[in-house]
Every structure is written in C-alpha cells, then in structure tokens.
Amino acid sequence: MTLSGINSLRLGPDEHGRFGIYGGRFVAETLMPLILDLEKAYRDAKADPAFADEIKHLATHYTGRPSPLYFAERTSAHLGGAKVWLKREELNHTGSHKINNCLGQILLARRMGKTRIIAETGAGQHGVATATVCAKFDLPCVIFMGATDVERQWPNVLRMKMLGAEVRPVTAGAGTLKDAMNEALRDWVTNVDTTYYLIGTAAGPHPYPEMVRDFQSVIGAELKDQFLQAEGKLPDAVVACVGGGSNAIGTFHAFLDEPGVALYGAEAGGHGIDVDNGHAASMTGGRPGVLHGNRTYLLQDEDGQILEGPSISAGLDYPGVGPEHAFLHDAKRVTYAPITDKEALEAFQLLARMEGIIPALESAHGLAQVMKLAPTMGKDQSVVLCLSGRGDKDVESVGKHLGMDMIS
Amino acid sequence: MSRITARFAACTAENRPALVTYVMAGDPDLETAQAILDGLPAAGADVIELGMPFSDPMADGVAIQVAGHRALKSGQTMRRTLAMVENFRKKDAETPIVLMGYYNPIYIFGVADFIAAAKAAGVDGLIVVDLPAEEDEELCIPALEAGLNFIRLATPTTDERRLPAVLRNTSGFVYYVTMTGITGAAIKSRAAVGEAVRRIKHHTDLPVAVGFGIKTAEDAQVFGRDADGLAVGTVIVNAVAETLNDGKPTERTVTAVHDVVASLAAGARRARSAA
Ligand SMILES: Cc1ncc(COP(=O)(O)O)c(C=O)c1O
C-alpha cells in the first residue's frame, strides 16, 4: 500500500530545506543570496512544463533513457536465492547516473543566465558528465578534483580535458572529494556573478539535495514501472551504493512509501568498520554535524574536526552523506551497511565474469550488498541493484590491486 | 555596555578606526599562540579575533587554511582555545575577544555548553562564517540571550533588500567583507568599499568594520577613513608562517607578529589625521 499525507516519507524538505533536523543552509553570507536565487529559479523551472519537456527530450535522445532493467540470470543462480536485477545506469551516455543531474542543472544554469560552470568530482564521473553538458551547451567549465583522485581516476581526467574542461587538482587535505568540494566553494564565493556551481550529489546547502534528488528520481520511477511490467509486482528489496547519495536517493525515492520494499544503501567500509579511521561509512561510523552547507552524518573526531576515511572507490570516500539519507537512517526506512574494499573487489570480478558487465567500483559496493542479501531471500523474491556506473575508469587500478600485469 | 561596544566608542572618541586583529588559536603551538595573544593589545590591537581552527575552512584562503592545520596538528582543541581566552583575561580585562570560525566544532561541543564556557572564559562575541541569518535559531539567538555579541558578515552580495535581515540579530559590530572571495584575496574596488560602509551605516547604528584583503599600513590608512574598524588576518598569520623553522617557532615568531600589528596600528592612526 502506498502511504500518503502526513505519514509520507516523501514530503521533505520543508521550507527551510530541512529533512527532520538534517539539511539546511549553512553557508557564508556571500553565498546566501545565490542559493536563494537558485531556489527561486528551481521553483520556477519545476512549475514550467517546457523545462520538464526539455529534460525528457534530452534524456531520450542524448542520455539514452530509459535505461534497461536487466535480469542477471547467472548471478542469481550463482547466489542461489532471490532473483537479481540490474537497473542499467551504466549504459547512460558518459557511463553513469551523473548525467541525469547534470542535464537538469545545466538547463537551470542557462535559464539563470550563468556563463561559467564549476563542479567537484571524486571518481571523475560527475566531472565527465559536467564537462559533457558544458561542451554540448558551449559553456566554459572548471572541475575541481583531489590530487589523489586525479591519479587513481586518470582515464576520466583525460576525458574531461578532451571535452574542453579545465581540471584543477586540489592538494589540500587528503586530496580527495571533500577537498575538491571546499575548493569549488571557494571558487564560487569568488566568482558569484558569472558562475553556477553544479554540485554532483544530493548534498550541500538547500536546494541542492532536493534538486539533485528530483533530477535523479527518474531512476526509481522507471525502475518501478519496468519491474511491474516484468513481474507484475514491486521488488522485495532495492539496493544502491551511497557516496553523497545521489544515485541512491534517485533510486529509493519512488519506493519510500512502499513498506513492502526493503531499501539498502551500501557505504564505503574501506579497510573495515572496526579499523580506526579506516573507512568512509559516515552513517555506520559517523555522527551528525555541519559541513558543506548542510547538517548530516559526518566522519569526525570528538572535537568536530572532519576525518577523511579511505576507500578503494574515489566516488564513495566523502566523509558525509546527503541530508535526506541521514533522515531516512534515523527513520530506519533505509538500512545503511558498510562494504569493505575487499568485498567490493570480489563483487567487481563476479559481475565481470557472470554477466559480462564491468561495474564501477562504487556500484560494486552495491553489488556486494546484494551478494549478502540475495542468498537469504527466497527464489520467488527479487532484489534490484542500481548499477550506477561502468568500470572502464577503474580497470587500471583494479588490475593493480589484483596484481595483474601485461604478460600473465 | 559590552567590551566591544566600549572599545569601538573609545576609538571613535579618539577619531581613529579600531584595529581588529585575527590570530589562529594554537598556531604554531599553544605556548607561542598564548604569547602572541597576550602581546596583541600592547602591539596596538583594539579588538582581537581568535580563530577556532577547523579542518575545512571553506571561506579562507591558503594562509589561514594552513594556520588552522598547524594548530590542529599541534593538538589544539576547543577547550584549549577557551583556556587561552581565560589566561588572557587574567591580564587584560578590557580588550574584547571575538571567537571566529565555523559551526561544526561548536555544534559538537554542544551549543549550550559552548556558550556557557565562552562566557565563563571571558569571550565577548562570536563570528561564525557558516551561520547566515537563516540559521539564527542554531546559535545566534541563544548566544545573544546569554549576553554574547553575535557579529555577522555583510558582503557585496548582501543587497539593500536583504541587509535588514542580516542586521536584525547582529550586535557588537558589523563585519563588512570587502569583496566576494576568500580571506587573503585582493580587494577589487576601494571606492565600492567606502560606499558599502556608508550604505550599511544608513541601516544601523552599530560600528562597521571592514575586512578580507587589508594587508598593509597603507591599506589601513585608506580604509580607515570610512570604516569604524579594520580587520586584518592573513598578513598576521603569514608572519607566523614566515618565521617558522621546520614547522617550529623561532625566537622571532612572537615579535614578528607584534611588529606587523604595530605597523598596521600606525597606519590606522594616520587614517584620519593625514589630509
Ligand atoms: C558510478 C558512481 N556511482 C556512485 C557514485 C557515488 O555518488 P552518489 O552517492 O552521489 O551516487 C559515484 C561518484 O563518483 C559514481 O561515479
């Protein structure tokens, strides 16, 4: 049964940009007028059918939507429990779900008359998607990327450059996604008149978490229809990996008020949740705090200094998570579980060998959760994974981890 | 009357802008930072901003970023920062101290506990960069109720329509940010700064200090004509950085900071005397 009205979990955020106590607008005064403008522009766009039509058209002809829902037959048989399905976001143009958000936001930036785009990126998928839409709409673009990530996601750096973007490596901190976001915010505060900040995940100050969720919700909406068509019911469980949480919230949102559908978010467990500062699982191992414009679960020390946990996946090592996930965690509507680097690597290889699909390391975290879940479920049950991206960018670093060389 | 209000009134009576100096608590280590702090009034500081280090200072340029990281590396915590104020207050009962930083370390300390501890230590005001007027319920209102000043930043993007909302719960003084940018960047238009100060004064009786990008005695002299206060941080923090040897303070570190402050104070004193 679909719930509605006051019991619905789909009503957030409120007018202050809050999901329960999470979210909000914790930004410097310089940026405050900008995010209020953005909110207004987004409200106007949302009410304009022409905006929705334009997104739909681009989704069909540029991204290649709808993405297929695929029954992973061999994987299902191998795991020996529930049927495993993949929502194939990795088949989108640019190779991940990130393009869904970028198309929505670039159209908004154009409506607002902005002439320069900036973005942060971790795995480089959001950077590539941003560089792509900037090329298409002829806007200059600067991508901030941690120096560590530049190294481990080198193929994506080349793609961004070929698309005409300027990539600025950030050496502060551990040189990963958090540091890239700090630097993007510093750029934005400096270039307020011309610049649109195209945030890549469902985090940051209001209205970004809501806006990014809305642009990504196409994933769950399609999935729900496709699954109904295929099986005549709703799936029993839906799984997605959680970095900042955009593919996960986009996948979950259509199911939040369907209590029969269990929802699982796979966080980056790194070396293991018991290893001190050895993971990036902000909900399993963090607590509420304020960073990058919103209140949410954060990895931090007892003095409120933010920690940077390691993950094999550059897209999941962010020390925070989008505020709507923090809310759903407290509400116990979604189960967030850590997946270690080792488990993700195993899942990565399994999908390659079983289905001929090389997943992104981020998505492999989700698959590892499916591998734990499916065997505990009945053969008449189904679990769907949002396969958020493809693993072309990761083959080199996974090869290194697995000790593969040129000869053998 | 709060210490902040009294100090601005005293400076105005002397027909000079107040020099508001920013130092990072715990930079490069606790002992040196305490010596720097304790000597600021004698060097010419009228109001002190004491930076609470944070791992992710989104509104700061490189100089203050690395100062914060030096402090954290040396083991600085919120309790230590508050203890620095307490020590300072044993020797100086008049110079106002404003704690400046970001919200998360305060939130994690606990808002009520933080306000009580800050009051007890002798803190006069707070500047919290990532708490705009829209989030006043978090800290601003309880701090004001406890008798702390809450100093808000107004910026070039704060337009005429928004200004009243920004000023509503501001007390002590208004901090006008001279540019859209991070600390330590270059001021884009000097004329625009003077104009903005006059515009803000149109809306409030509070003193207006200007900050971000003031670097030299000459800057102090120029901006001190229009503003009631001059906030300087990056060049002071740089004086620490430039005198370190292998990350450790040298015998020049404390005096180098005080020399920079003295030079800025001299510039500020010339602001309205020279024709
Ligand atoms: C393929 C893929 N999946 C997931 C993520 C994590 O981001 P989010 O949690 O916002 O979906 C990334 C981020 O880089 C990614 O590239």
Image (cartoon, grey):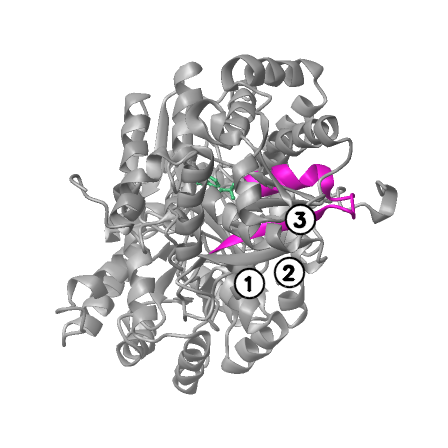
Indicate whether B43 appears above or below A262: below
Indicate whether A325 appears above or below A140: below
Give the image quarter of residue B27: bottom left
Q: Badge 1 is on which residue?
A: A284
Residue A315 in sight: no
User: Mark 3 and mark 2 in contact (Cβ < 8 Å)?
Assistant: no
Q: In this view, does A379 lie to the left or right of B80?
A: right
Label 3 amino acid?
Leu
Q: In which quarter of the image is the N terminus of chain A?
A: top right
Residue that appears at 24% across and 51% down: B216
Mark 2 close to ligand 1, CB under 8 Å: no
Indicate whether B180 appears above or below B240: above
Q: Is residue A308 left or right of residue A8?
A: left
Helix, strand or loop for disc 2: loop
Distance from the alpha carbon under mark 2 to that under mark 1: 25 Å
Q: Where is residue B138 in the image (x, y as percent from the top left)?
A: 64, 60
Per the image, is A265 magenta? yes
Q: Which chain carries label 1?
A: A
Sort mark 3 into few (<14), some (14-19) or many (20+) by Cα contacts within 10 Å: many
Sort mark 2 into few (<14), some (14-19) or many (20+) by Cα contacts within 10 Å: some
Label 2 amino acid?
Glu
**Disc assigned to residue A263:** 3
Q: Badge 2 is on which residue?
A: B138
Marks 3 and 1: same chain?
Answer: yes
Per the image, is A396 magenta? no
**Disc assigned to residue A55:** none
User: Which mark is in front, 2 or 1?
Assistant: 1
- Give the mark nearest the N terminus, 3 or 1: 3
Q: Position of residue B181 (x, y in %)?
A: 39, 42
Helix, strand or loop for disc 1: helix
Sort mark 1 into few (<14), some (14-19) or many (20+) by Cα contacts within 10 Å: many
